[in-house]
Image: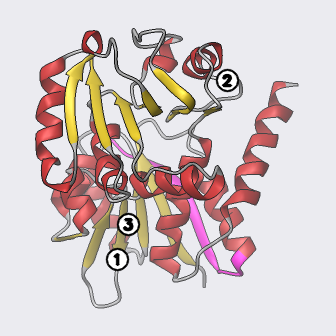
């Protein structure tokens, strides 16, 4: 009988997680079933309890339940504790539950492994101060960049978030209007502006020579932030599809004890975007 996994969220129909984990399982010879479960806004704790009681082995969690999942688990990884939200629950054989957040390590692996972009001693700017950004700060700072700057429309939110991680490295927060005169080796868009077809207000001279830009969002076409990056001379202009697959690979590895190959799955998802666009 196959082990049972799922992703819970609301909405959830758009999720690519079932396809990703099914491809991972096929690739690694693992016997499992993975589905997407729509959960009522006030029914998350009950849904998790039911899933586990029915023998479920692990869950991925997406919006709007990541913070609630964090509060449910008695044991959290250090990066999950820092993030204040989790996207992975592992129901272990001894009855305990481990909560983890794999978004940040997924981003770091996509940058460093898939795109050969170095982070050590680099100046990094992260746009936005919401949960998506908070979830990636610990793994980013672990790579020992020269500085991480969080810029947000509301500067106080960026400064408050930076303070939570100040013990891990050189990190500060500011408003978008305070970026003038600064240059960065890597700019990561963690805002949802691309979903609205917009780009945060950024100075034209923001990018250092050979800078890279990365949008956590992804889609069938290049995002508005990628277009901005290309127009402003970025050496690399990347979207977040690789981050999506890499965070899934990290969860799969936690659950199954074997690491899948991410690049073939990223390629297959990218090709499916192109096929659907025709």
Instruction: Find disc 1 in the rendering and name its residue.
Output: 91
Marks 3 and 1 sit apart, C-alpha to C-alpha, by 10 Å
Instruction: Find disc 2 in the rendering and name its residue.
Output: 222
Residue 240: which quarter of the image? top right
Q: Nearer the viewer, residue 78 or 10?
A: 78
- Residues under numbered marks 1 and 2 in contact, where contact means CB atoms less than 8 Å apart: no
Relative placement, left or right, of 1 versus 131 is right
Categorize mark 3 by other alpha carbons within 10 Å: few (<14), some (14-19), many (20+).
Answer: some
Q: Residue at x 26, y 30 (%)?
A: 129
Q: Position of residue 167 (x, y in %)?
A: 13, 54
Q: Position of residue 198 (x, y in %)?
A: 49, 10
Question: Which one is earlier in the sequence, the residue at label 1 or at label 2?
Answer: 1
Q: Secondary structure at mark 3?
A: helix
Marks 3 and 2 sit apart, C-alpha to C-alpha, by 37 Å
Relative placement, left or right, of 125 versus 130 is right
Instruction: Find disc 3 in the rendering and name its residue.
Output: 51
Which numbered mark, 3 or 2, is in the foreground of this view?
2
Residue 37 belongs to magenta span: yes
Q: Nearer the viewer, residue 278 or 80?
A: 80
Q: Secondary structure at mark 1?
A: strand
The span shown in magenta is 28-40
């Amino acid at each position: 009988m196959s082990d049972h996994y799922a992703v819970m969220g609301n909405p959830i129909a758009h999720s690519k997680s079932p396809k990703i984990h099914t491809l991972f399982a096929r690739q690694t010879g693992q016997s499992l079933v993975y589905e997407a479960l729509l959960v009522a806004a006030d029914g998350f704790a009950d849904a998790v309890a039911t899933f586990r009681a029915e023998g479920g082995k692990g869950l991925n969690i997406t919006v709007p339940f990541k913070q609630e999942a964090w509060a449910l688990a008695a044991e959290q990884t250090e990066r999950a504790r820092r993030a204040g939200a989790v996207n992975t629950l592992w129901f272990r054989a001894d009855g305990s539950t481990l909560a983890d957040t794999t978004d940040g390590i997924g981003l770091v692996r996509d940058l460093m492994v898939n795109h050969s972009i170095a982070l050590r001693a680099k100046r990094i700017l992260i746009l936005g101060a919401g949960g998506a950004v908070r979830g990636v700060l610990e793994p980013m700072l672990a790579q020992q960049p020269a500085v991480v700057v969080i810029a947000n429309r509301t500067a106080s939110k960026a400064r408050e978030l930076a303070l939570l991680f100040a013990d891990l490295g050189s990190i500060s927060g500011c408003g978008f209007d305070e970026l003038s005169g600064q240059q960065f080796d890597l700019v990561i868009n963690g805002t949802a502006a691309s979903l609205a077809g917009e780009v945060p207000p950024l100075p034209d001279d923001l990018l250092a020579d050979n800078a890279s830009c990365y949008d956590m969002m992804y889609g069938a076409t290049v995002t508005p932030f990628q277009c901005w990056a290309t127009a402003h001379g970025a050496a690399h202009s990347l979207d977040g599809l690789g981050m999506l697959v890499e965070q899934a690979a990290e969860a799969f590895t936690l659950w199954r004890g074997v690491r899948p190959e991410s690049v073939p799955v990223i390629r297959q998802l990218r090709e499916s975007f192109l096929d659907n666009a025709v």
